[in-house]
Amino acid sequence: MKKQIKYYVAGCHLLLFSSLSTAAEFVCDDNIDTTTQNTKESQILWQQTLTYLSGVKEILTKSHGCDVGPLAVIQTNDGSGDIARDCVTDYQDVQEVIKHLKQVLANPDAAKACFDTQKNYDDFPLYTASEKIKSTYDVAGWLDRPTLTEFYSKTSGDMQEAGLTLAKAFWPIVTQSHMPDYLETDITANALPELWAAVGWLPLYADGDKAHNERFRGGYAYADVMSPWGLLRIKSIDGESVGAEIGMTIQLQDTFYPYHFHHPQEFYLPLTAPECGTENLFFAAHADSTLFEHSSEDNSFIIDADKATDLPAWFIQKSPNGNNFTYFERNTVHAFNAAKRCGETPSALVSVWGRTTSRNNDQTTLVCEVIEQQGGSRNAEPHSRFRCTPTQWEY
C-alpha cells in the first residue's frame, strides 16, 4: 500500500526554540509501505529508530562549548593555520533539523505513519553486511536484504578485497564504537544492534569511478535512518519541508575519501577512536580558501598539498572525545583519511552523519578530479594534485 499520508495530532504543546505549536501535521512521502508496520520486527526497528533520533537531537542540542549544542569544526585550516569553529545551533538549517526531531519525538504515533521498514522497497537496492548478521539479528533476518558480501563477490581487484573485508568485519568494526563522554544517549551498534544490523546500507561509490580509488570504493558505505530515502520519510511537518537526512557512515582503514563538496550542509560525529594516533584524519576548508590555487580563467581551483608540510597542517584527527564534531557549510571542500591502524584486526572510521537540507537543490556529491600523480600506491592520495570545479548552486 503506497499513498500520501497526513496525520494530525491535537493538543500537543511543543516548545521549539521560541515557537509554541498546538498541533503537528505530518505529511509523509508518497511511497510509504505501511503493510509491515505492525509486525514484531517492525516495532523493534521503530523503537531503535526513535532512540537513534533522540541521540542525534542530544548531539545537536547538549551544551558542549556553546550555550546550546556543540562547538563544531567548520574548517580544519582556515588558510592561516588555525582551526575554525562555530556554534552549529546558530545556523538556521540546524535549528530546523532540531525542531523537526523534537516534533517527531514528541509525536511518535503520528511520525510512525511515515515509517517504512523498507522490506519491500524497490527504488534502489539496500544491503545488510553479511548472512551472519542476518542469522544473528532478528530484524535483519526478517528483512532478508541482499548482502554486501554477495554484492562485492561480483566485483574484482582492490574493490572486491576491501568490500569483502568490510562485509566480513562489519560487526566487530561497528561495535568498536563509543559515544563521547559528555553525551548520555548511546546510539552505537552496542546499544542499538537491531538498527545497525537491519538499516539499509548503500555502497555509494562502488558503481562509479568518480572516487578514483578502488579500495575506497569497496570500503565505504552509508545508511539513512531518517531522510527522503530512509526508514522514516517525512515530507513536511506543519507545512515546513523536512530536510533532515540522518544516518551513519563507515569507512574502512587504509582508504582515502578524496576531496569533495556538495550543496547540502552536513555534519559528522565520529564514534571510533584512533588506536595509534595517526589514523582517522579529516580536512575541511571553504572553497575560496587561500590554501588552494584559484584559476583566473574559470571557477576551478587546484588542491596541491605537500606531503611533508601541508598535510600535517591541513588534516586533524577525528575522535569521539576530540572536540571535533564537524559541520560543513555549502561547498566546503572536505576529505577523510582512514589510515592503517597499529593492530592486525580490521578497523574503520564509523560516524553519526547527517545532512540538513536534503530536499533543496542538487544533492550530488562532487568529487574533485585527480589531474597529476605525486607518488603513492593508490590512485588518489591526500597529496595528489586535484582540480575542483564548484557548481553555481541555486540557493
Image (tube, rainbow, N blue to C red):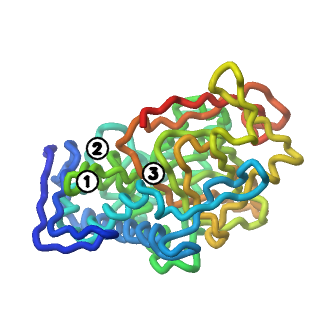
Q: Which amino acid type corresponds to the residue marked 3 in the rendered image?
A: Arg
- Is residue 193 among the parts visible in the rendering? no
> In this figure, which residue is indicated by the disc labeled 2?
121
Tell me the distance, in whole angstroms, between the alpha carbons under discs 3 and 2: 22 Å
Tell me the distance, in whole angstroms, between the alpha carbons under discs 2 and 1: 9 Å
In this rendering, is residue 48 above or below 94? below
Which x, y percent locates residue 222? Answer: 49, 50
> In this figure, which residue is indicated by the disc labeled 3?
355
Q: Are marks 3 and 2 in contact (CB under 8 Å)?
A: no
Spot the residue most to the right: 308
Q: Tell me the element at label 3.
A: strand
In this rendering, is residue 203 above or below 37? above
Q: State the quadrant of the C terminus.
A: top left
Q: Tell me the element at label 2.
A: loop
User: In the figure, is residue 352 to the left or right of 388?
Assistant: left
> In this figure, which residue is indicated by the disc labeled 1?
116
Tell me the distance, in whole angstroms, between the alpha carbons under discs 1 and 3: 20 Å
Q: Are marks 2 and 1 in contact (CB under 8 Å)?
A: yes
Which residue corresponds to the image point at 78% horizontal and 60% vertical from the top-left?
Answer: 278
Comparing 229 with 37, the one in front is 229
In this rendering, is residue 105 above or below 308? below
Q: Which amino acid type corresponds to the residue marked 2 in the rendered image?
A: Tyr
Q: Tell me the element at label 1.
A: loop
Q: Earlier in the sequence, mark 2 or mark 1?
A: 1
Which x, y percent locates residue 30? Answer: 20, 43
